Amino acid sequence: MLLEVRQQYTFYGVLLYVASTIFVLYLSMGEPEGPVWKGLFWMIQLFVCVNAVAKSFLQEGRGRLLYFFSITSPGNFIIAKLMFNAGLMLLMSLVSLGLFVLMLGNPMPNPVVFIFISCLGGMSLSLVFTFLAAIAARAQQSAALMAILGFPLVIPQLLLLSKISNIAFAEVIQGGLAGMICVLTGLDVMLVALSLILFPFLWKD
Amino acid sequence: MLRQKWWKIYCVAALIYTCIAGFLGRVPALPIINETVRNLYFHVGMWFGMMILFIVSVIYSIKYLRTNNHVFDIYAVEYAKGGIVFGCLGVITGSIWARFTWGAFWSNDPKQLGATIALLIYFAYLVLRNSMTDMDKRARIGAVYNIFAFAMLFPTIWIIPRMVESLHPGGMGNPALDTNDIDKRMRIVFWPGAVPGWTLLGVWITTLRIRLQLVSEKKQTSSEPAKKNFSHA
C-alpha cells in the first residue's frame, strides 16, 4: 500500500521548490539574525508543506481513487497517506534545515535540539495538511480552499513551534521544553486519531 | 423542551437583571480596571455563550455523521453561526475594554489573536460549506470539518494562552478570568444573571433560525414535486 503512494516526480518537484526558495531568500536577506532566521524557517516549512502535501490528494484522479477504494479500506488508506506525507515532510525538514545552515548561516547554539524540533514540527504540519487536503479534494475547489481552511488551523501549531524553537535558540537550556513537546505530540496523536475516525465519512461517495 | 416558555422568560429576566445590576450595582474598586469591570457581565458572558454554542454545534455534527439525518446538519450550521455572532461580539466588547484598560483597541495580545483565529476557523467552515452545491456532500464534509476544527480550536483557546504571557487576566490558571478579582457582589450577578442569560439568548436566536430554515426547506421540498408533475405533463 505504501508503495502505491510513492510518486517520484512529487518528491523532486518539492526538492527543487525548497532549494530555489531558500536561494531566493539568501539573495534577498543575506545572513539574518536569530529571530528572523527562525521565522523564515517556519514560513518555508509551511509553504513546502502546503505544496508537497496538498498534491497528495489533489493529483489523484477519480479513477485512481476508485482503484484504491477497491483494494483497501479507508483506514488503511489514510494511514498510508499520513505515513507517507509525514516521511516526506521529515525529509524536507532536514533538507531545508541543511540548506538554511549552508546559505543563511547557523545562528543556533544547540543544533541537535533544533533538528529534533524541526522534524517534529514538519511531521505535525504534514498531518494537519494531509487531512485538510482530503477535505479540500472532496470539495473540488482545491488550492484556494486549502489555504482558507489550512492557515487558521495551523496557526496554533506554528505558535507552539516557534515557542519551542525559542527555547532551542536560547543560550541556556530553559525549563518547559518537555512540557511543550508533550503538548505538540499530544496534538499529533489527536490528529491521527481524528483522521482515522473521520476519514471513512469523507471517503464513501 | 425547547418549545417551552419558562427558559425564555428566565433569559429575558436574567438579561434585564444583568443590565440593571451590571450598570447600577456595586463593584469592587480595582486599580486600572476601575468601573470598566462591569464589562465582565457582557464580555465574559459572550465567550461563555460562544463556547457553548460551538460545543452544541459539534455535538450535532457528530449526530449527523452517525444518523445521516439532514435536520441535524441544519442544527449544526445554525449553532455554529450563532457562535460566530457571539464570538464577534466578544471580540468587540473585549477590545472596547482593552481600550480603557490596556490603552489600545488592539494590542496583538495572545488572547486577542487566539480569539481571532477561532473566528477565522469558523468563517472557513462557512466558506467550505458554500463551496459545494451538492446538499448531501456539503453536509457530510461540513460535519467532518466542524469536528476537526473544533479539535484544533481547543488548543488555540484553552492551552496556548496559558503558556504565553498576556495582558489578559488569569494568566497561569483559568484562561478567561481570575475568580479572585470578582467578589461576592459581582458573582451574584455574574453566575445566575450574565452567563445563563447570554447563553440562553444565543440558543433562542439559534432555535428561531433553525425553525426558519426547516420551514423554508419544507417549502422547497413541497414545491419541487409540483414542478416535476408540471414538466411531465
Image (spheres, coloured by chain):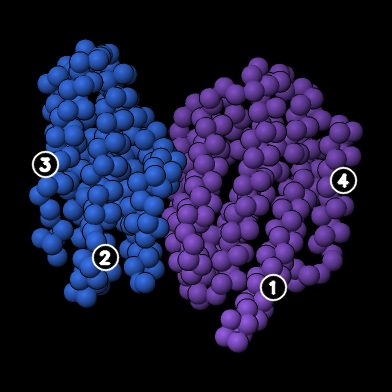
Chain colours: A blue, B purple
Question: Where is the N terminus of chain B found, in terms of image quarters?
Answer: bottom right
Q: Are marks 3 and 4 on the same chain?
A: no
| Cα distance in 3D space between marks 1 and 3 | 55 Å
Q: At numbered mark 3, what does the secondary structure look like: helix, strand or loop?
A: helix
Q: Is residue A28 above or below residue B74?
A: above
What residue type is disc 1 on? Lys
Q: Read off the chain for label 1.
A: B
Q: Read off the chain for label 4.
A: B
Q: At numbered mark 1, what does the secondary structure look like: helix, strand or loop?
A: helix
Check residue A12 in the rendering and tell me which mark sits there, or answer none.
3
The residue that disc 1 covers is: B219
What residue type is disc 3 on? Tyr
Between disc 1 and disc 3, the foreground one is 1
| Cα distance in 3D space between marks 2 and 3 | 24 Å
The residue that disc 2 covers is: A62
Q: At numbered mark 4, what does the secondary structure look like: helix, strand or loop?
A: helix
Residue A105 is situated, as x and y percent measured from the top left of the image, at 17, 16
What residue type is disc 2 on? Arg
For residue B106, what is the image quadrant?
Answer: top right
Sequence-earlier tag: 2 or 3: 3
Can I make out residue B180 in this image? Answer: no
Q: Residue at x 34, y 68 (%)?
A: A203
Looking at the image, do the residues carrying marks 1 and 4 touch, with CB atoms under 8 Å apart? no
